[in-house]
Image (cartoon, rainbow, N blue to C red):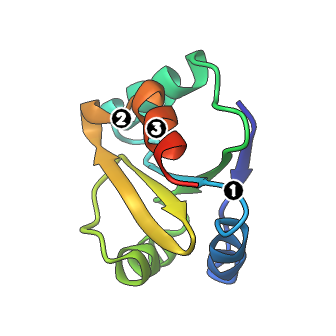
């Protein structure tokens, strides 16, 4: 799994543009949360679906970006949380123990 770090609000515009060509996943992660660490480890143990780009947001360092994500993609903030972005919209989100690579792959394959 190759994470691209999400460290600047301006990257959200790039994510929207990128999502018009391929699905994009944002994983909101807190290093202080055991559930978040377990969810991240589960994702990293699995094979990421081809053609899906993964971003990692450190919630402790970049809380303002998390707030912007909630506003822009109209989701309620959770931690940990995964969002699947396609064509500029959040088409799927999940949190806590519901975060699974198989489900991300399935959801990504449903929308072209």
User: What crowding class fits label 1: few (fewer than 14 Cα within 10 Å), some (14-19), or many (20 or more)?
Assistant: many
Query: Which quarter of the figure has residue 96?
Result: top left
Q: Is residue 64 above or below residue 55?
A: below
Task: Specify whether 38 is left or right of 78.
Answer: right
Write down the residue under mark 3.
Answer: 104
Q: Is residue 73 above or below residue 90?
A: below
- Residue depicted at x 40% and y 60%: 91
**Secondary-structure class at tag 2:** loop
Task: Specify whether 25 is left or right of 36.
Answer: right
Write down the residue under mark 1.
Answer: 22
User: As rendered, which of 86 and 59 lies closer to the eye?
Assistant: 86
**Secondary-structure class at tag 1:** loop
User: What crowding class fits label 2: few (fewer than 14 Cα within 10 Å), some (14-19), or many (20 or more)?
Assistant: many
- Place of residue 19 in the rendered image (x, y in percent of width and height, measured from the top left): 64, 65
Query: Which quarter of the figure has residue 23?
Result: bottom right
Write down the residue under mark 2.
Answer: 99
Q: Which quadrant of the figure contains the C terminus?
A: bottom right
Sooner in the amino-acid sequence: mark 3 or mark 2 = 2
- Place of residue 98 in the rendered image (x, y in percent of width and height, measured from the top left): 27, 33
User: As rendered, which of 43 and 93 lies closer to the eye?
Assistant: 93
Cα distance between the residues tagged 1 and 3:
13 Å
């Amino acid at each position: 799994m190759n994470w691209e770090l999400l460290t600047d609000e301006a990257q959200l515009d790039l994510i929207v543009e990128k999502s018009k060509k391929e699905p994009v996943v944002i994983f909101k992660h807190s290093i202080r949360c055991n559930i978040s660490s377990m969810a991240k480890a589960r994702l990293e143990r699995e094979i990421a679906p081809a053609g899906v780009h993964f971003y990692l947001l450190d919630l402790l360092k970049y809380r303002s970006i998390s707030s912007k994500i909630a506003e822009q993609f109209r989701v309620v903030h959770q931690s940990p949380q995964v969002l699947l972005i396609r064509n500029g919209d959040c088409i799927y989100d999940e949190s806590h123990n519901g975060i699974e690579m198989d489900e991300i792959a399935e959801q990504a394959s449903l929308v072209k």
